[in-house]
């Protein structure tokens, strides 16, 4: 746990200077964000400062008690928290009452029940070992800089991935997962916004003869949001429709992707550009999503949904089960060979591209006869139809419940009595089988066993429907000053791949172009790693790792560098990250 002795006034109060709110906090109370507290005149970052080690997270499940070695205690004299500059009251805080250090999501002790930390429910890559990781050294950055440059790559700035420890195969000690690696994360490290001083921890470690520096801070992100991918065919709302929580606009429906609906939530316009309530609700919603909690959303002219990272979306009260196997046309292609011997016509109903087997390229190549079928909608290319119905929550993301409503007729020129017709949705969850009577009208009949297998195989080939949440933030502002006296040096170093950026130890995707704009899957970040401040803004861990020589060359804070051994007493939690992911 990170502590800092602060000047105390005659009422026992201290000022937190970790963000612009500048809370004045009485002894035994927490500041407006609940991230900092006053413990006898010390400013305490209440979440444990966390390091990661690589290994087999499942092997740690059930070990330890999830303890954090939280030292000390805070008086609970019931003194009211004082208002900070924003007028937001603080709240009472004690280490014992604060459950974030031993969050249920992290506690892997006990009887071995289903537990997020073990990854047994959502495949999360973390486990927790009790106690404090006081020793160990970090393996050199995964992309060790090649001393003197990599032949053929030029400029001495190429990086290569090291698969074995220095010394080659002969030096391998049998450690399959590289469990000896330790990474200092920014989780619980604290914030130094607006970064007029060095980041909270600048840590040096030597691994494989490479001196590596990791700079960590809990960045305050006013420019941030989340992208949400929702695996469903159901119509959740029109593109650009406003997404609301508690009636406040927090984002919009954006361009759909293959088999998924997409939301773009948050961003500076919603956080700071609207009413105070809009900013607060947006911030709370983003925080909940990033910390893997469920959020109920309402889309203008569309659905009400419950969205939670790693869980199935709940659309208008119905939990989605399957992500479609493909569009209607792709489904025809995948299963044409299995259908052709057993049926005369197949229609795969899809809101985007409905497929018709006999007309489709796949059917033609399999010598299927024309059936004279005429569908609603507009024909794009043979066997591929657009807009056969309106979007909705029925078959294949359309609004239909009776598939025959999209069949205009069977033309007598080609059709025949007894023609066998299978209609199926893109998830295989809905299907019906028909045979034409003497008037060429489809009559529902029992699905032959020969077709049942292929219908079931569509569902078998569908992946579970999930919500994915990617945090996206811009770290190109003052945060860089906590790393270097010459901020552009950090930006350039990242662009040249000399500096690796991680979020709570998780790999990030860095956008090309200017700035330091990154995205990270929140399920890769340890639980409850995100926080917020009432400005409003999200707080996210961010780490920069680079060779010490490069750090000094870009104007790094040389006087702030400490060794892993030096900071060991402040480490409050050691998580095991699954090296196989
Ligand atoms: S809101 Fe800001 S000033 Fe107040 S306790 Fe939190 S970080 Fe400190």
Image (spheres, grey):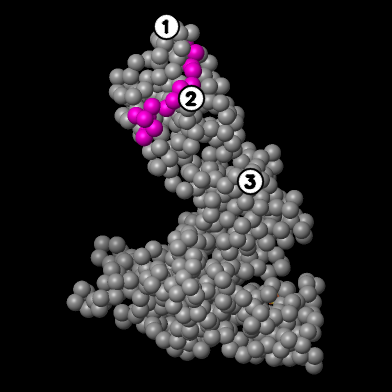
Label 1 residue SS: loop
Farthest residue to the top: give it.
413
Farthest residue to the left: give it.
170
Q: Nearer the viewer, residue 12 or 495?
A: 12
Magenta part of the chain: 440-454
Query: Residue at 66% across / 65% down in the picture?
Result: 537
Inspect the magenta stretch and tell me whether residue 447 lies in it: yes
| Quarter of image, res 225 | bottom right
Inspect the magenta stretch and tell me whether residue 536 lies in it: no
Q: Earlier in the sequence, mark 3 or mark 1?
A: 3
Crowding at dot 3, Cα within 10 Å, few <14 / some 14-19 / many 20+, comes out as few
Asked if the residue at tag 1 contacts the one at tag 3, i.e. Cβ–Cβ closer than 8 Å, the answer is no
Whether residue 382 is visible: no
Label 3 residue SS: loop
Crowding at dot 2, Cα within 10 Å, few <14 / some 14-19 / many 20+, comes out as many
Asked if the residue at tag 1 contacts the one at tag 2, i.e. Cβ–Cβ closer than 8 Å, the answer is no
Which quadrant of the render holds ligand 1? bottom right
Mark 3 lies on residue: 317
Q: CA distance from mark 2 to mark 3?
A: 30 Å
Mark 1 lies on residue: 413
Mark 2 lies on residue: 385
**Considering the image in quadrants, where does the C terminus appear?**
bottom left
Lateral position of residue 26 relative to residue 186, left or right: right
Q: Nearer the viewer, residue 541 or 391?
A: 391
Label 2 residue SS: strand
Rendered location of residue 265, percent (x, y): 62, 53
Query: Residue at 36% across / 65% down in the picture?
Result: 580
Lateral position of residue 405 relative to residue 547, left or right: right
Q: Is mark 3 within 8 Å of ligand 1?
A: no
Lateral position of residue 210 relative to residue 463, left or right: left
Between label 2 and label 3, give the one nearer the viewer: 3
């Amino acid at each position: 746990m990170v502590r800092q002795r602060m000047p105390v006034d005659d009422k026992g109060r201290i000022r937190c200077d970790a963000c612009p709110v500048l809370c004045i906090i009485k002894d035994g109370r927490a500041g407006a964000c609940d991230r900092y507290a006053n413990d006898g005149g010390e400013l305490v970052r209440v979440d444990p400062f966390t390091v990661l080690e690589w290994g087999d997270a499942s092997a740690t499940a059930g070990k330890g008690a999830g303890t954090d070695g939280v030292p000390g205690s805070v008086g609970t004299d019931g003194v009211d928290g004082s208002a900070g500059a924003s007028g937001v009251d603080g709240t009472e805080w004690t280490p014992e009452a604060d459950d974030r250090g031993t969050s249920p999501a992290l506690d892997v002790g006990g009887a071995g029940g289903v537990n997020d930390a073990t990854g047994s429910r959502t495949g999360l890559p973390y486990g927790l070992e009790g106690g404090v990781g006081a020793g160990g050294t970090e393996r050199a950055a995964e992309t060790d800089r090649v001393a003197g440059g990599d032949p053929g790559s030029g400029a001495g700035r190429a990086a290569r991935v090291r698969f074995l420890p220095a010394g080659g195969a002969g030096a391998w000690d049998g450690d399959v997962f590289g469990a000896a690696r330790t990474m200092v994360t920014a989780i619980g490290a604290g914030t130094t916004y607006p970064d007029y001083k060095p980041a909270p921890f600048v840590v040096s470690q030597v691994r494989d003869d490479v001196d590596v520096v990791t700079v960590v801070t809990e960045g305050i992100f006013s420019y941030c949001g989340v992208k949400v991918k929702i695996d469903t065919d159901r119509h959740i709302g029109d593109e650009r429709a406003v997404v609301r929580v508690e009636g406040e606009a927090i984002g919009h429906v954006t361009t759909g992707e293959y088999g998924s609906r997409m939301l773009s939530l948050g961003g500076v316009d919603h956080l700071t550009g609207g009413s105070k309530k809009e900013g607060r609700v947006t911030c709370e919603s983003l925080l909940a999503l990033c910390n893997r909690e469920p959020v109920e959303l309402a889309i203008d002219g569309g659905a009400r949904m419950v969205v939670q990272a790693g869980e199935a979306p709940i659309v208008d009260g119905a939990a989605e089960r399957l992500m479609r196997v493909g569009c209607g046309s792709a489904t025809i292609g995948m299963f044409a060979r299995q259908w052709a011997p057993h049926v005369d016509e197949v229609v795969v109903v899809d809101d985007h591209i409905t497929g018709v087997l006999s007309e489709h390229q796949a059917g033609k190549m399999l010598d299927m006869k024309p059936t004279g079928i005429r569908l609603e909608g507009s024909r794009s290319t043979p066997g591929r139809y657009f807009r056969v119905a309106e979007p909705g929550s029925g078959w294949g993301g359309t609004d239909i419940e009776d598939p025959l409503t999209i069949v205009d007729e069977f033309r007598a020129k080609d059709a025949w009595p007894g023609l066998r017709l299978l209609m199926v949705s893109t998830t295989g969850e809905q299907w019906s089988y028909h045979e034409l009577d003497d008037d060429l009208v489809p009559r529902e009949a029992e699905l032959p066993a020969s077709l049942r297998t292929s219908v079931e195989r569509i569902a078998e080939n569908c992946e579970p429907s999930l919500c994915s949440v990617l945090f996206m933030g811009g770290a190109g502002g003052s945060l860089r000053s906590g790393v270097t006296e010459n901020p552009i040096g950090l930006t350039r170093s990242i662009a040249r791949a000399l500096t690796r950026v991680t979020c709570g130890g998780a790999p990030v995707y860095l956008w090309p172009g200017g700035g330091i704009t990154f995205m990270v899957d929140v399920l890769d970040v340890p639980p409850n790693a995100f926080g917020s401040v009432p400005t409003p803004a999200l707080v996210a861990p961010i780490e920069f790792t680079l060779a010490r020589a490069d750090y000094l060359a870009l104007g790094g804070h040389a006087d702030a560098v400490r060794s892993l051994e030096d900071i060991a007493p402040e480490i409050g939690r050691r998580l095991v990250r699954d090296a196989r992911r």
